[in-house]
Image (cartoon, grey):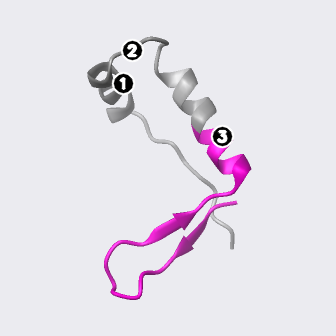
Amino acid sequence: MARIIESQTGSRRMIKMSTDDIISVVQDYQRIVPRFSSIEDARSYLADTVIFIPEEV
């Protein structure tokens, strides 16, 4: 499960992801973005999509 790590400076937080989290995100990406899409097309497909990662509680 993903774990949010607070920044010491109060700026952006980091998300520590497990191997399973990364595989899940890649699978979602492959499901959403057609093969051989350009970067612009991939951004367009992903702009309207939300990918959730479970957080460890």
What is the three-letter code of the residue carrying label 1? Ala
Relative vertical location of residue 20 with respect to residue 3 in this rendering, above or below: above
Q: Are marks 2 and 1 in contact (CB under 8 Å)?
A: yes
Image quarter for residue 28?
top right
Residue 24, numbered label: 3
- Disc 1 packing (10 Å; few <14; some 14–19; many ≥20): some
Question: Which comes sooner in the sequence, label 2 or label 1?
Answer: 2
Q: How far from the left and from the top, in percent, is residue 24? A: 65, 40
Q: Is residue 10 magenta?
A: yes
> Which residue corresponds to mark 1?
42
At 55% across and 48% down in the image, what residue appears? 52
- Closer to the chain start, of discs 2 and 3, is 3
Task: Magenta stretch: give its range.
Answer: 1-25
Tell me, yes or no, whether the two marked residues, 2 and 3, touch with CB atoms within 8 Å: no
Q: Quadrant of the N terminus?
A: bottom right
Measure how far apart labels 2 and 3 are at the Cα level: 20 Å
